[in-house]
Amino acid sequence: MPDATSLTYLDMHATPRVADVDRAALRPEFADLPEHLRRPQHVSTRDDLLDRLRSNDAVLLQSHGWPDHAYLDGAFVFTPDDIDEPVEGLQLLWLLSCGQQKQRAAWQRKFPNALLVTSEHTVYPRTFTKVALAVVAEHHRTGALPTRASLQSILDRYRNRQWDLDADG
Protein backbone atom coordinates (compact mmCIF):
# COMPACT_ATOMS: atom_id res chain seq x y z
CA MET A 1 0.00 0.00 0.00
CA PRO A 2 1.45 3.43 -0.85
CA ASP A 3 2.07 5.66 2.12
CA ALA A 4 -0.43 8.51 2.48
CA THR A 5 1.94 10.20 4.92
CA SER A 6 5.69 10.13 5.29
CA LEU A 7 7.29 8.41 8.23
CA THR A 8 11.01 7.73 8.48
CA TYR A 9 13.14 5.80 10.95
CA LEU A 10 16.58 7.40 11.34
CA ASP A 11 19.78 6.35 13.12
CA MET A 12 22.36 8.92 14.20
CA HIS A 13 24.85 6.43 15.66
CA ALA A 14 28.26 6.57 14.00
CA THR A 15 28.32 2.78 14.27
CA PRO A 16 24.85 1.44 13.39
CA ARG A 17 23.56 -1.31 15.66
CA VAL A 18 23.20 -3.86 12.89
CA ALA A 19 22.91 -6.98 15.05
CA ASP A 20 20.01 -5.54 17.04
CA VAL A 21 18.25 -4.40 13.87
CA ASP A 22 18.75 -7.80 12.23
CA ARG A 23 17.36 -9.67 15.27
CA ALA A 24 14.30 -7.44 15.47
CA ALA A 25 13.67 -7.57 11.71
CA LEU A 26 13.48 -11.38 11.84
CA ARG A 27 10.53 -11.35 14.24
CA PRO A 28 7.39 -12.91 12.69
CA GLU A 29 5.32 -9.74 13.07
CA PHE A 30 7.63 -7.95 10.63
CA ALA A 31 7.68 -10.71 7.98
CA ASP A 32 5.52 -8.67 5.57
CA LEU A 33 7.59 -5.51 5.95
CA PRO A 34 9.71 -4.79 2.85
CA GLU A 35 13.43 -5.20 3.45
CA HIS A 36 14.23 -1.52 2.92
CA LEU A 37 11.84 -0.58 5.74
CA ARG A 38 13.40 -3.00 8.23
CA ARG A 39 16.49 -0.85 8.75
CA PRO A 40 16.83 2.72 9.91
CA GLN A 41 18.27 5.22 7.46
CA HIS A 42 21.59 6.59 8.64
CA VAL A 43 22.10 10.32 9.09
CA SER A 44 25.55 11.68 9.80
CA THR A 45 25.17 15.47 9.75
CA ARG A 46 22.93 18.01 11.42
CA ASP A 47 21.93 19.46 8.04
CA ASP A 48 20.81 16.05 6.76
CA LEU A 49 18.84 15.47 9.95
CA LEU A 50 17.19 18.89 9.80
CA ASP A 51 16.20 18.29 6.17
CA ARG A 52 14.56 15.00 7.12
CA LEU A 53 12.76 16.54 10.08
CA ARG A 54 11.36 19.24 7.80
CA SER A 55 10.39 16.92 4.93
CA ASN A 56 8.55 14.15 6.81
CA ASP A 57 5.29 13.94 8.72
CA ALA A 58 6.79 11.64 11.36
CA VAL A 59 10.32 10.78 12.46
CA LEU A 60 11.55 8.01 14.73
CA LEU A 61 15.02 9.18 15.75
CA GLN A 62 17.48 6.69 17.19
CA SER A 63 20.27 8.69 18.78
CA HIS A 64 22.40 9.10 21.83
CA GLY A 65 20.58 10.81 24.66
CA TRP A 66 23.74 11.66 26.55
CA PRO A 67 26.51 13.73 24.92
CA ASP A 68 29.35 11.68 26.42
CA HIS A 69 27.93 8.51 24.86
CA ALA A 70 27.70 10.20 21.47
CA TYR A 71 31.28 11.39 21.60
CA LEU A 72 32.47 7.90 22.50
CA ASP A 73 30.67 6.54 19.44
CA GLY A 74 31.95 9.32 17.19
CA ALA A 75 28.41 10.55 16.53
CA PHE A 76 27.18 14.11 16.67
CA VAL A 77 24.88 15.37 19.39
CA PHE A 78 21.55 16.90 18.37
CA THR A 79 19.67 19.16 20.76
CA PRO A 80 16.74 21.57 20.47
CA ASP A 81 19.30 24.38 20.25
CA ASP A 82 20.34 23.07 16.82
CA ILE A 83 16.97 24.12 15.38
CA ASP A 84 16.63 27.81 14.53
CA GLU A 85 12.96 27.94 13.55
CA PRO A 86 10.15 25.70 14.81
CA VAL A 87 9.28 22.81 12.48
CA GLU A 88 5.51 23.17 12.12
CA GLY A 89 4.83 20.24 9.77
CA LEU A 90 6.15 17.37 11.87
CA GLN A 91 3.26 15.47 13.49
CA LEU A 92 5.20 12.80 15.40
CA LEU A 93 8.71 12.89 16.84
CA TRP A 94 9.77 9.82 18.79
CA LEU A 95 13.17 10.28 20.39
CA LEU A 96 14.32 6.67 20.73
CA SER A 97 17.06 7.45 23.22
CA CYS A 98 17.34 8.06 26.91
CA GLY A 99 17.80 11.40 28.59
CA GLN A 100 15.40 13.44 26.47
CA GLN A 101 12.77 14.01 29.16
CA LYS A 102 14.73 16.91 30.69
CA GLN A 103 14.54 18.76 27.38
CA ARG A 104 10.94 17.81 26.61
CA ALA A 105 9.59 21.38 26.82
CA ALA A 106 12.37 22.65 24.53
CA TRP A 107 11.73 19.85 22.00
CA GLN A 108 8.00 20.63 22.08
CA ARG A 109 8.66 24.33 21.35
CA LYS A 110 10.73 23.34 18.30
CA PHE A 111 8.07 20.88 17.10
CA PRO A 112 4.84 22.56 18.26
CA ASN A 113 2.42 20.35 16.31
CA ALA A 114 4.15 17.03 16.98
CA LEU A 115 3.11 14.25 19.29
CA LEU A 116 6.38 14.01 21.19
CA VAL A 117 7.55 10.72 22.70
CA THR A 118 10.54 10.81 25.06
CA SER A 119 12.27 8.72 27.71
CA GLU A 120 14.40 9.56 30.69
CA HIS A 121 15.49 5.98 31.33
CA THR A 122 17.98 3.78 29.55
CA VAL A 123 16.36 2.23 26.50
CA TYR A 124 18.16 -0.82 25.21
CA PRO A 125 18.78 -1.11 21.45
CA ARG A 126 16.80 -4.33 21.07
CA THR A 127 13.83 -2.67 22.74
CA PHE A 128 13.73 0.49 20.70
CA THR A 129 14.39 -1.40 17.48
CA LYS A 130 11.37 -3.67 18.06
CA VAL A 131 9.15 -0.75 19.00
CA ALA A 132 10.34 1.39 16.07
CA LEU A 133 9.77 -1.44 13.59
CA ALA A 134 6.27 -1.97 14.99
CA VAL A 135 5.50 1.71 14.32
CA VAL A 136 7.00 1.47 10.81
CA ALA A 137 4.99 -1.71 10.12
CA GLU A 138 1.72 -0.10 11.25
CA HIS A 139 2.37 2.93 9.06
CA HIS A 140 3.22 0.71 6.08
CA ARG A 141 0.04 -1.33 6.62
CA THR A 142 -2.36 1.59 7.08
CA GLY A 143 -0.72 4.53 5.31
CA ALA A 144 -1.71 6.67 8.28
CA LEU A 145 0.38 8.13 11.03
CA PRO A 146 0.09 6.33 14.35
CA THR A 147 -2.21 7.86 16.94
CA ARG A 148 -1.56 8.20 20.65
CA ALA A 149 -3.78 5.13 21.19
CA SER A 150 -1.98 3.00 18.59
CA LEU A 151 1.42 4.01 20.00
CA GLN A 152 0.25 3.05 23.48
CA SER A 153 -0.97 -0.27 22.09
CA ILE A 154 2.49 -0.94 20.61
CA LEU A 155 4.16 -0.09 23.92
CA ASP A 156 1.72 -2.38 25.75
CA ARG A 157 2.37 -5.19 23.27
CA TYR A 158 6.09 -5.07 24.05
CA ARG A 159 5.41 -4.46 27.75
CA ASN A 160 7.42 -1.28 27.59
CA ARG A 161 6.94 1.53 30.09
CA GLN A 162 10.07 3.51 29.29
CA TRP A 163 8.59 6.17 27.03
CA ASP A 164 6.34 9.03 27.99
CA LEU A 165 3.37 9.82 25.76
CA ASP A 166 1.98 12.45 28.13
CA ALA A 167 2.41 16.06 27.11
CA ASP A 168 2.94 17.17 30.69
CA GLY A 169 5.57 14.53 31.40
Image: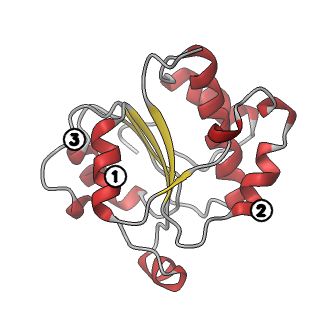
User: Considering only vertical position in the picture, is 105 above or below 79?
Assistant: above
| Foreground residue among 83 and 6 | 6
> Would you name the residue on which mark 1 appears?
104
In the rendered image, residue 61, in percent from the top left (x then y), is placed at 47, 51
In the rendered image, residue 168, in percent from the top left (x then y), is placed at 35, 40
Could you tell me the amino acid type at mark 3? Answer: Val
Residue at left offset 71%, top offset 44%: 130
Gap between marks 1 and 3 measured at Cα: 15 Å
Query: For mark 2, does the 10 Å Cα neighbourhood hold few (<14), some (14 to 19), or many (20 or more) residues?
Result: few
User: Considering only vertical position in the picture, is 123 above or below 113?
Assistant: below
> Would you name the residue on which mark 3 appears?
87
In the rendered image, residue 70, in percent from the top left (x then y), is placed at 47, 76
In the rendered image, residue 122, in percent from the top left (x then y), is placed at 60, 64
Observer-side mark, 3 or 2, equals 2
From the viewer's perspective, tell me whether residue 96 is left or right of residue 56: right
Q: Which mark is residue 19?
A: 2
